């Protein structure tokens, strides 16, 4: 059996809980330990995998007889439930003890834990795991497409380097508009963190706010020029502050990501289009040689259909 993840949480004794259920110090040590299982132990069907060896490794004061006797006492008090579970993630898929707190047991330190936040952390971890698996299983099909109308890319303006006069006029117009409004110009600008928000500050200068909430005015001419030239080529992004936690529309996916470069298993492709499907969207890409095709699921060899929010998260992970 593979090594079980090490416990790193601090154990806190709930003295009111101890008094209510007349627990000994030994019983309290074990309840404090069990109350933390949800933070690190492997979960199977609602039970947390925990071996006697692991407990004694974390708490050397316990010997096997004392440990098993204390677990039995906590079960008789109705504070915990146990059953045998199979942990497929561990080598050999062993059967081990699964343990969970009962409704009474969950009263332990209930004022010190934030269940909603714990659930959100678990949800995000599961989402990240699923996203990584999706990306790992992506392949590219460059077979000729039959849906000609759906496969046509939406053109976005990509002018060559504009004359300085045109740029100056453009900068003046945007600066005037956003200095009066006080609204953000946009975020998700190349070479900056995707959540850095650009705006015009009280000095009528280009500035941005970092994801940590720090306000910074741009002073380097090359960076200022890069921003304005990029915005000139992407006028659809003016006033578009992307909330990456919200589900994008098909139109927003096209506006934000068409012609973006993505990297799949070391190979670069360009996003050519997003095609609406019955249960989401398909992503059409093209190679450097101009061949077009859809992202496919390597497990099924079928064109991969993403939900819009999953599609956006996937793209952000594999942007080249």
Image (spheres, rainbow, N blue to C red):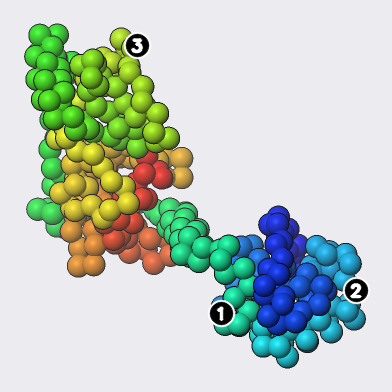
Q: Mark 2 points at which residue?
A: 63
Q: Nearer the viewer, residue 308 or 29?
A: 29
Mark found first going from the N terminus, 2 or 3: 2
- The residue sitting at 58% across, 62% down in the picture is 112
What separation in Å lies between label 2 and label 1 (alpha carbons)? 29 Å
Q: Which of 310 and 27 is in front in this view?
A: 27
Q: Which of 286 and 2 is in front in this view?
A: 2
Residue 304 picture location, percent across and down: 32, 60
Q: Describe the element under mark 3 as helix, strand or loop.
A: loop
Mark found first going from the N terminus, 2 or 1: 1
Q: Describe the element under mark 2 as helix, strand or loop.
A: loop
Q: Describe the element under mark 1 as helix, strand or loop.
A: loop
Mark found first going from the N terminus, 1 or 3: 1
Look at discs 2 and 1 and give the one toward the viewer. 2
Callouts 1 and 3 close, C-beta under 8 Å: no
Q: Mark 3 points at which residue?
A: 220
Callouts 2 and 1 close, C-beta under 8 Å: no
- The residue sitting at 13% across, 42% down in the picture is 154
Residue 57 picture location, percent across and down: 83, 64
Identify the disc placed on residue 45: 1
Please give left or right for residue 205 compared with residue 105 in the image: left
- The residue sitting at 13% across, 30% down in the picture is 181
- The residue sitting at 68% across, 57% down in the picture is 9
* Quarter of the picture holding the N terminus: bottom right
The 10 Å Cα crowd at callout 1, few under 14, some 14 to 19, many 20 or more, is few
Note whether 250 is above or below 73 in the view shown. above
The 10 Å Cα crowd at callout 3, few under 14, some 14 to 19, many 20 or more, is few
User: Residue 43 falls in which quadrant of the image?
Assistant: bottom right
Note whether 54 is above or below 127 in the view shown. below
Residue 176 picture location, percent across and down: 11, 20
């Amino acid at each position: 059996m593979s090594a079980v993840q090490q416990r790193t949480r601090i154990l806190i004794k709930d003295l009111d809980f101890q008094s209510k259920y007349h627990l000994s110090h030994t019983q309290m040590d074990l309840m404090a330990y069990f109350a933390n299982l949800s933070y690190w132990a492997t979960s199977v069907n609602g039970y947390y995998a925990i071996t006697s060896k692991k407990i004694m490794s974390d708490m050397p004061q316990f010997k096997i007889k004392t440990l098993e006797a204390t677990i039995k006492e906590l079960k008789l008090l109705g504070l915990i439930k146990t059953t045998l579970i199979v942990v497929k993630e561990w080598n050999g898929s062993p059967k081990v003890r699964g343990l969970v707190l009962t409704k009474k047991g969950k009263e332990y330190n209930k004022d010190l834990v934030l269940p909603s936040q714990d659930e959100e952390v678990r949800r995000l971890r599961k989402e990240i795991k699923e996203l990584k698996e999706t990306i790992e299983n992506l392949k590219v099909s460059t077979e000729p497409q039959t849906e000609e109308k759906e496969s046509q890319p939406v053109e976005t303006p990509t002018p060559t380097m504009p004359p300085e006069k045109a740029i100056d006029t453009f900068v003046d117009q945007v600066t005037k508009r956003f200095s009066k409004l006080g609204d953000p110009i946009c975020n998700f600008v190349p070479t900056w963190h995707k959540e850095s928000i650009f705006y015009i500050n009280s000095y009528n200068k280009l500035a941005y706010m970092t994801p940590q909430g720090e306000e910074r005015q741009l002073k380097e001419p090359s960076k200022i020029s890069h921003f304005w030239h990029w915005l000139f080529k992407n006028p659809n992004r003016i006033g578009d502050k992307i909330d990456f936690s919200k589900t994008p529309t098909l139109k927003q996916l096209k506006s934000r990501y068409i012609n973006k470069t993505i990297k799949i298993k070391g190979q670069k492709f360009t996003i050519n289009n997003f095609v609406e499907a019955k249960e989401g969207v398909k992503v059409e890409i093209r190679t450097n040689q101009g061949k077009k095709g859809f992202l496919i699921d390597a497990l099924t060899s079928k064109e991969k259909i993403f939900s819009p929010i999953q599609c956006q998260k996937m793209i952000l992970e594999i942007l080249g």
